[in-house]
Amino acid sequence: MIRPVHALRRDPVLTALWAALVIFAVIWLSPFIFIVFTSLKTVTEVMTTGAFLPPQNPTFENYRGAWRLGNFEATFFNSVLISFIKVPLALIVSSVAAYALARMRNRWNKALLLFIVFGTMIPFQVMLAPIFTLVNKLGLIDTYLGLILPYLANGLPYQIFILNSFFRSVPKELSEAALIDGASHFTTFRRVFLPIMLPVLAALLILDFVATWNEFAMALVILQDPDKWTLPLGLMAFQGQFSNDYGQLNSAIIITVIPAVLVYLIFQRYFVSGLTSGAVKG
């Protein structure tokens, strides 16, 4: 059947929405394009050409210089070490705690969950001074452990809240059938819930990794030795020393951003599928 001509016309509202999305995408990408182009230019070319013009003679010397002069080898290693310890450990602790609060019967579960969620309501800046005092009394100032522990305490309440909601959305029959068959709670968690919660864990992994990788304030308070600094602190110091060298400065920014982008791209499809992770086929 041939559709009328007027039915083939584009919806003006849909066209306007697409135009608005394109405009916002261009605005959002403009700073990133500026950073990438500038990182591939020499100082002279940065001063003589426009900010959004592609480099005439692309060079990666800015990246080598920034990596060497900014001591990014040490700061990059520190960020990788802290993130690769903190993020998996947080997911393990939060998933087990959320399962216990959602599936193990206890009259104190709701009160405990409320107490944990209350931790997300306290502004992070308010906790800096008390956390520094506590870490200092424990003798953990300027150590990796002194930074990982506050990171865990700050991120766990949000993750437990999200995972607890996920566990409650899964039909009770799944866990009850396994318990009736003689499975322990650990076996039920590992064999029944873990396979279906992978998309949620992937989404939390992305969010937690990006937050840990980019965290600045707590690292600035706890870490005092430049050799223990994370990438955001190294970038701050580099910016103070080479603020006029736009090529190397923007190269340093890209060095800092790339790992977080790669983690997102790797787990992107799991992140998207996590939006429908609550659905269970009957």
Image (tube, rainbow, N blue to C red):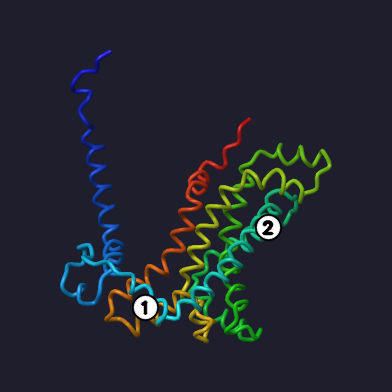
Residue 43 in the figure: left or right of residue 128: left
Between 141 and 98, the residue placed more toward the observer is 141
| SS class, disc 1 | helix
Which residue is at a point 63% across and 83% down the rendered structure image?
A: 140
Indicate the quadrant containing the N terminus: top left, top right, bottom left or bottom right.
top left
N-terminal of the two: label 1 or label 2? 1
The image quadrant of residue 241 is bottom left
Q: Quadrant of the C terminus?
A: top right
Q: Mark 1 Cα within 10 Å, few/some/many (few <14, many 20+)?
A: some
Please, what secondary structure does the residue beneath circle 2 have? helix
The one of 116 and 95 positioned closer to us in this rendering: 95
Residue at 24%, 17% in the rendered image: 3
Residue at x-position 58% and y-position 66%: 84
Amino acid at the residue labelled 2: Ala
In this figure, which residue is indicated by the disc labeled 2? 97
Frontmost residue, 253 versus 182: 253
71 with respect to 201 (left or right): left
- Tally the numbered discs: 2
Note whether 227 is above or below 10 in the view shown. Answer: below
Measured from the top left, where is residue 158 in percent x and y? 56, 60
Classify 10 Å Cα crowding around label 2: few (below 14), some (14-19), many (20 and above): some
Where residue 9 appears, as percent x and y from the top left, is: 20, 28
* Residue labelled with disc 1: 65
Q: Which residue lies most toward the left here?
A: 48
Q: Is residue 246 above or below residue 85?
A: below
